[in-house]
Image (tube, rainbow, N blue to C red):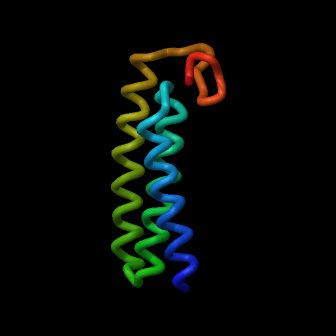
């Protein structure tokens, strides 16, 4: 069980770094959703199943609003990813 907690913690940190390093809001929101999922998985591995479900639903609601707002402001036909010249 400790291995799962370590895996979820590592993936949570990895996706949160992905949120801060993304030049495009589309990929940033994807990283935020995956980071929230792994953070809630970490809470489940510690024994807080109800807290993680409620937290994940609140995160998804907030992220939906932020994603709709940021995608309406940006309107990129070809979003810049990490591997592109502009992403580095």
Most foreground residue, 84 or 61: 84
For the point 44% across and 48% down, which residue is it? 16
Most foreground residue, 75 or 81: 81
Residue 74, percent from left and from top: 44, 17
Residue 49, percent from left and from top: 41, 78
Residue 16 vertical position relative to residue 66 in the rendered view, above or below? below
Q: Image check: 61 left or right of 8?
A: left
In this view, the residue farthest toward the front is 88
In this view, the residue farthest toward the right is 83
Residue 85, percent from left and from top: 62, 17
For the point 49% across and 69% down, which residue is it? 41
For the point 47% across and 58% down, which residue is it? 12
Residue 36 vertical position relative to residue 47 in the rendered view, above or below? above
- Quarter the N terminus occupies: bottom right
Total label count? 0
Quadrant assignment, res 87: top right
Residue 81 vertical position relative to residue 47 in the rendered view, above or below? above
Residue 78 vertical position relative to residue 16 in the rendered view, above or below? above
Residue 51, percent from left and from top: 34, 73
- Quarter the C terminus occupies: top right
Most foreground residue, 22 or 88: 88
């Amino acid at each position: 069980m400790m291995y799962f907690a370590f895996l979820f913690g590592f993936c949570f940190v990895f996706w949160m770094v992905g949120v801060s390093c993304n030049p495009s809001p589309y990929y940033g929101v994807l990283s935020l959703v995956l980071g929230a999922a792994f953070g809630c998985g970490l809470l489940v591995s510690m024994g807080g199943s109800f807290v993680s479900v409620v937290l994940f639903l609140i995160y998804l609601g907030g992220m939906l609003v932020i994603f709709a707002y940021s995608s309406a402001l940006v309107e990129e036909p070809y979003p810049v990813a990490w591997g592109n010249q502009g992403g580095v």
